[in-house]
Image: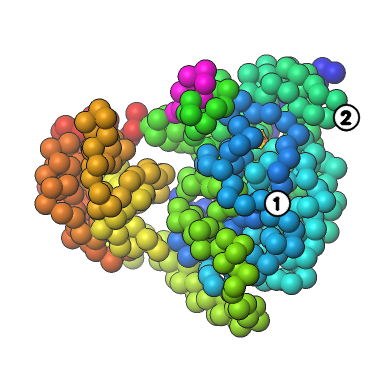
Amino acid sequence: MDLPVIESTSPQAGGCSAGSCGSSASQMGGMSDEIRARVQDHPCYSEDAHHYFARMHVAVAPACNIQCHYCNRKYDCANESRPGVVSELLTPDQAVKKTLAVAATIPQMTVLGIAGPGDPLANPTRTFETFRQLALKAPDIKLCVSTNGLALPDHVEELSKHNIDHVTITINCVDPDVGAKIYPWIFWQNRRIHGREAAAILIQRQQQGLEMLVAKGILVKVNSVLIPGVNDEHLKEVSKIVKAKGAFLHNVMPLIAEAEHGTFYGVMGQRSPNPAELKNLQDACEGDMNMMRHCRQCRADAVGLLGEDRGDEFTMDKIEAMDIDYEAAMAVRAELRAKVTAELEAKRNKAHAPAGLQVVQFMPRQKTPAGRAVLMAVAGKGGLVAVHFGHAKEFLVYEASAAGAKFVGHRKAEQYCAGDETCGDGESVLDRTIKALDGCEVVLCSKIGFEPWGNLEAAGIAPNGEHAMESIEDAVMAVWNEMLAAGKLDAKPASNSTPAKCA
Ligand code: CLF
Ligand code: SF4
């Protein structure tokens, strides 16, 4: 079978009601009240929400109907996860019990997703039995699913019946020649199909599924894995096409390829993109599409806020011993939702206040030059500068400029205070953290020790502990305004190896 290459028709057309902007405030500001209500407590669909609300995944879907070169069956689905074995494969009954237990313990948990470890729609009986039970027993939890799309057109009707409002499709290409370099085979209509023909079928099914979901009014997020030299340039075209067809959000994620994972790409030495390459591509796609930049490439059994996995607290043996009062948990969750909704509304109103009201806080009083953009890393939690440098497992990266503070990604780190072991090549945990912050000129944290302070300065990164417990965006802009006033933003950064724009 030879299916045609899909071409972009009208990049600006389509049903996505949101404006094209990656920053959280404008993302939320550009959408209708109806859409806002549907995403404002979903941590993946709303950047604001991910500071407040948690998601969990239940690993009920072991099989897959395709092979991706970045996947090893022993590891979680790379569509929605970082590599790492799924601790426990669950039956639908166990998954429901686990969901109720987590919801009773973590009132911020508002979304239940099925994202592997294989493809949820290649395991429809297990997936839909889980959703069916949860729709009855936990009606206040949003249901979410992630799929490679091959079986999607066969299940759109069923998805809509279970009130599943959010679907993610992983679309890495719209050209079968590119697809043949990513997917060695698919299993479709009872036969294994290889190469370009396989990729063409997969692409056609993904696009058909996307159109069908949009026609049903289901919010579709598209995930794409950025594979340098394979689909990097091509993803701009993917972004235009999925936007034109009505996808709500595009999430470009970096390929994770390590030889020890045993994946084809890992073994063949296919490299992963660096943070600058990822950001540049996200920026290039942003003109046409809402971009998600806060994805943490979760495990298929992740539990908790994005970037904070609490899965170990909810193994089946621990759950069996729990006393679950779900009704009480529902009441607590409803209260929390109302509180956070009010907080987000206030934040949004502040972001969209008339320019004159914002000048004092955000905008420099000088006319021109406005000062260059600066990347700042923040050890943050819950939207605040709240984490000790040595305790940070990740840093949130913001781009500060005259236009405001824009979240552009995150960098993983090891906890420096958990023990500064030096590995074989003489590199310490602190060295690796500093390397991970490449391109950032400032680090904001609640506290920092003497040694890391000195090492960061030596690397050309200014440590800053003066804004502890302040709102991240306010703190970032305060530091940027200080740099502007001190004349530090006229020239290029002094010694840090990568320029501020990550390019
Ligand atoms: Fe899970 Fe995915 Fe639903 Fe979110 S994750 S099924 S949409 S509830 Fe979120 Fe995790 Fe990124 Fe996925 S941060 S990997 S985008
Ligand atoms: Fe692996 Fe997911 Fe690809 Fe299937 S769709 S091969 S589980 S990454």
Label 2 CB less than 8 angstroms from ligand 2: no
Q: Position of residue 12 (x, y in %)?
A: 64, 38
Q: Magenta residues?
A: 266-273
Q: Which mark is residue 60?
A: 1
Residue that appears at 62% across and 77% down: 324
| The magenta stretch spans residue 290 | no
Q: Is residue 370 above or below residue 35?
A: above
Q: Is residue 476 visible?
A: no
Residue that appears at 60% across and 32% down: 71
Q: Amino acid at mark 2?
A: Asn
Which residue is at the front of the view, 237 or 129?
129
Q: Is residue 484 left or right of residue 263?
A: left
Real-space Cα separation, disc 1 to disc 2, in angstroms: 22 Å
Residue 112: name its quadrant: bottom right
Residue that appears at 66% across and 51% down: 89
- Which quadrant of the figure shows ligand 2? top right
Q: Total of numbered circles in the picture?
A: 2
| The magenta stretch spans residue 272 | yes
Q: Which mark is residue 190?
A: 2
Q: Is residue 167 left or right of residue 318?
A: right
Which residue is at the front of the view, 483 or 129?
129
Image quarter (top left, top right, bottom left or bottom right) of the C terminus: top left
Q: Amino acid at mark 1?
A: Val
Q: Position of residue 17 (x, y in %)?
A: 64, 51
- Of mark 1 and mark 2, the one earlier in the sequence is 1
Q: Which mark is residue 464?
A: none
